Image (cartoon, rainbow, N blue to C red):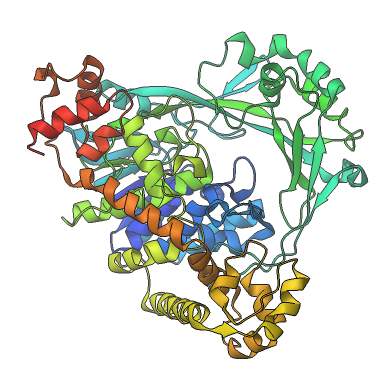
Amino acid sequence: MINNYDIIVVGGGHAGCEAAAAAANLGSQVLLISMDLTKLAQMSCNPAIGGVGKGQIVREIDALGGYTAKVADLTTIHFRMLNTSKGAAMWSPRAQCDRMMFSVEWRKQLEAIKNLYLLQDEVIKIDIAGKFIKGVFTKSGNYFTTKALILTNGTFLNGLIHIGKTSFQGGRIGELPSNGLSDQLREIGFEVGRMKTGTPARIDGRSVDFSKLIEQKSDILGKFSFNCNITTLLKGKSCFIAHTNKAVHEELKKGFSDSPLFSGKIKGVGPRYCPSIEDKVHTFWQKESHQLFLEPDGDSTYEMYLNGFSSSLPIDIQLNALKLIEGFENVRILRPGYAIEYDFFQPTQLYHTLESKIVPNLYFAGQVNGTTGYEEAAGQGIIAGINAHLKINEKKEFVVKRDVGYIGVMIDDLVTKGVDEPYRVFTSRAEFRILIRQDNADERLTPLGYLLGLISEQEYFRFQDKYRKIDELSKFINSFSIEPSEINPFLLSVGSAEISQKKKIKDILLRPEVFLLRMIKEVEVLRVKLKDFFEVEIIESAEIKIKYKGYIEKERLFAEKYDKYEHITINPDFDYLRFESLSTEARQKLSRIKPQTIGEAQRIPGVSPSDINVLLVYFGR
């Protein structure tokens, strides 16, 4: 067995898989150590990828040369583009995937990477000499040396599972936790906290009366990856909407006295935006009903996931409450819902590269940083993998800025603000969301992925060809004028006012009720002239650029103004405590977080504009 590696990745979840793949594809010799190699990138909760803000991250990972989008597309059984009734900045792709096939496909992808090695084992101790990474010790007695270490342990660090009054150790139900690493890192100065998350019961789909539920069919077209050749081979399945009622709530309340959430047994902080059903009933006591989504777990299984019904109540309470939901009168469960507590490390202890400020060449990614969600974890994973490789090869670090990607928004939020609850990405967290839409993730990040070496020549050629077509289509729309007789029948069909003289297509497209794809299909002169532009992503991208041009330009100017402070660097050893003109809170926060730039400093909660002015005066700006 090889005992020397450039980079070791601990944990085979979504963060670990992306980190290992990125570092290995860049040329590092990488060892990925996971406690169970049959569950790589396991979907512990909902077997879904994407969602509001999350779907944007998945497309960004793909644009950089990652794998989550490709694996999702190969295993999709239900796809929807969310928020299409709103502006393009809010559109968010989401897919239900086959849970088992997702993990199988991820392993196929990893096994095809030349420099990547897999090992089923558990890391029990990190070899740190004088605060420098030397290697890791494993449970089976192995010792491996490494130049850089990436921790992506997910919910396994001192994991504790709760179901009613019953509690037992576990990283996921049926799987052992990882103990020891948290204590070791705490001893050398890391701030360690406790988080909580949960999952619903798994439902036997054969026991549900779907005629009483509202069916949600999959969109016909839709995928994550910008690679047109990757698409699912699985059959599509519908999702279904159900609702709780007063009787369900009353049944749930019977278990409140045994709930670890209310008894104080659970010490960790849970996700505000994904609360358990008992928490929703307790907090929103005036609501008589809560919406639930019954979603398939796979193409060839009857197991289903009841999104919105996460619970750690006793099993009998969970089952009795489920049977009171319309359509679930005869329901059977395959596995009860449960809550899990786990250790995390406050992310203000990291640089934007996700390298530790305390131990050089030690990186953290995923739920160990206090985040929640596969997408957030995967986004951190690829950044950690890239930067670990760059660091050990003495190359310039790679950081995604806030106006370049949601990955940048997320990491900047984590390292400058820290977390006091599980962090989840939303479009509302991004101040430049018109610039960082899901449709243009490749335009923003593929050139960077290509320069890094994660995007192949073939992929980059396809990217260039796509944007050449978008530019050509945009130029045509901006310059071509159309006769009233050619366009008026179409305008009437969409409820838009007719024109009385020739008008440019651009001016007509600015009308909110007019959409370019339909216009091209229904207006003969356009259908003939644009016969080479029938790719949906080409048409949508050109349309967005034209319809939102004013907003895009305005936001770009704001981003450039915002960016000026990012170039004013601060020495990490700068002594803030000697500046009495700074507020006490600012001195404390700046000393603890040690921002690298004035831009970072101004985003730290508790650092006021007047504090920033003091720093600017000191630095002669």
Question: Can you say whether 214 is above or below 570 in the image?
Answer: below
Q: Is residue 449 left or right of residue 105?
A: left
Position of the N terminus, as image quadrant, is bottom left
How far across and down, in percent of the image, does residue 53 sit? 52, 47
Q: Is residue 6 visible?
A: no
Residue at 64% across / 64% down in the picture?
A: 222
Question: Can you say whether 221 is above or below 378 in the image?
Answer: below
How far across and down, in percent of the image, does residue 412 sit? 34, 40
Question: Can you say whether 175 is above or below 42 in the image?
Answer: above
Question: Can you say whether 564 is above or below 396 in the image?
Answer: above
Position of the C terminus, as image quadrant, is top left
Question: In this view of the protein, which residue sits in the foreground, 265 or 120?
Answer: 265
**Which residue in the rendered view is the most extreme toward the bottom?**
528
Query: Toward which corner of the image does residue 286 lie, by quadrant?
Result: top right
Q: Is residue 194 left or right of residue 589?
A: right
Residue at 61% across / 81% down in the picture?
A: 534
Residue at 46% across / 40% down in the picture?
A: 429
Query: Toward which corner of the image does residue 193 lie, by quadrant?
Result: top left
